[in-house]
């Protein structure tokens, strides 16, 4: 929602919103513009934000797709975009977004945050760090897969243990803590702002260094540090799905094939 808010106010001509989920009370502390009324009626997140964008910009700027990204409808909608902002919380969804970017030659910005914890013998569980990551994937460049943002093993474990308590704890915002409504809006805003700023910096180059030096940006709020990885430092594998477009089965996934 934070990225969508920014691009709406920046004047994007069309904003394709893809999400299968509904607003719940536990979302209200981190989804912009969501209300208690939205949660009470289980309003689709994309419908809520599409209405917000309409109030801000008017017209038919927002195009809500109330479906999972792992659907033919969502994939074909995303394929029409000029840029993909990947703001998801599963490895599976990142894989789909990564394949869309490769198949249709669309630049992709992926953003993620994490709050690792550890157990102190005296004080119990404590926060180790507060971190964020922004990856820019250019068409024909290294993919999220090349960067190990997701791997076959991680996706397998995610699918195998989707309802497992320990797995959910490990994959959540705060590692080691089962929290349905984590207060992470400040961290999300920090990461989302960096994500959209990366897009702007590539549209209007104002940095002192070439943009290839910022293939990945990582920040640590604990250490007050920000690090970068150059595109040339990332080992790139052969990408058989590059520029295949709508070749069937879509994205090389039988479940997305045409009927």
Image (cartoon, rainbow, N blue to C red):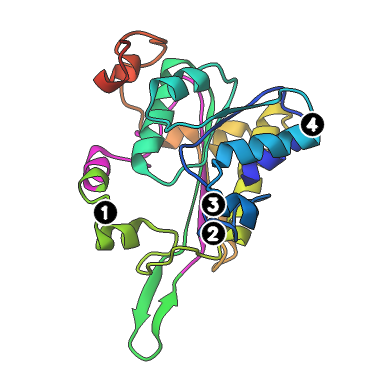
Q: Nearer the viewer, mark 1 or mark 3?
A: 1
Q: Which residue is mark 2?
A: 25
Badge 4 element? helix
**Helix, strand or loop under label 2:** helix
User: Closer to the observer: label 1 or label 2?
Assistant: 2
Q: Secondary structure at mark 1?
A: loop
Q: Earlier in the sequence, mark 4 or mark 1?
A: 4
In the picture as drawn, the residue positioned furthest to the front comes out as 41
x and y percentages locating residue 200 in the rendered image: 70, 34
Extent of the magenta region: 129-157
Task: Tell me which label, 2 or 3, sits earlier in the chain.
Answer: 2
Left or right, residue 101 beside residue 40: left
Q: Is residue 12 left or right of residue 176?
A: right
Query: Which quadrant of the figure has residue 186?
Result: bottom right
Q: Please tell me which of labels 1 and 3 falls first in the chain.
A: 1
The numbered dot on residue 163 is 1
Figure disc tally: 4
Q: Nearer the viewer, mark 4 or mark 2?
A: 2
Q: Whole-percent x and y of residue 167?
A: 27, 57
For the point 55% across and 67% down, which residue is it? 223
The residue pinned by badge 3 equals 227
Q: Vertically, is 218 above or below 211? A: below
Circle 4 residue: 57
């Amino acid at each position: 929602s934070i990225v969508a808010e920014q691009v709406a106010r920046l004047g994007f001509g069309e904003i394709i919103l893809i999400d299968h989920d509904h607003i719940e009370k536990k979302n209200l502390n981190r989804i912009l513009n969501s209300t208690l009324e939205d949660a009470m009626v289980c309003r689709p997140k994309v419908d809520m934000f599409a209405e917000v964008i309409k109030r801000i910009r008017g017209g038919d700027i927002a195009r809500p797709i109330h479906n999972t990204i792992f659907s033919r409808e969502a994939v074909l909608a995303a394929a029409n975009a000029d840029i993909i902002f990947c703001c998801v919380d599963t490895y599976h969804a990142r894989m789909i977004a990564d394949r869309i970017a490769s198949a249709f030659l669309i630049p992709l910005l992926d953003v993620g945050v994490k709050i690792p914890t550890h157990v102190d013998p005296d004080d119990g569980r404590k926060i180790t760090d507060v971190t964020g990551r922004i990856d820019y994937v250019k068409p024909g460049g290294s993919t999220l897969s090349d960067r190990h943002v997701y791997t076959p093993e991680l996706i397998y474990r995610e699918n195998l243990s989707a309802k497992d308590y320990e797995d959910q704890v490990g994959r959540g915002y705060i590692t080691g803590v089962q929290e349905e409504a984590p207060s992470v809006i400040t961290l999300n805003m920090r990461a989302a702002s960096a994500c959209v700023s990366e897009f702007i910096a590539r549209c209007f180059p104002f940095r002192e260094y070439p943009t290839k030096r910022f293939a990945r940006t990582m920040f640590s709020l604990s250490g007050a540090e920000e690090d970068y990885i150059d595109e040339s430092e990332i080992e790139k594998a052969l990408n058989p799905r590059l520029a295949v477009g709508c070749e069937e089965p879509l994205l090389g996934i039988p479940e997305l094939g045409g009927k």
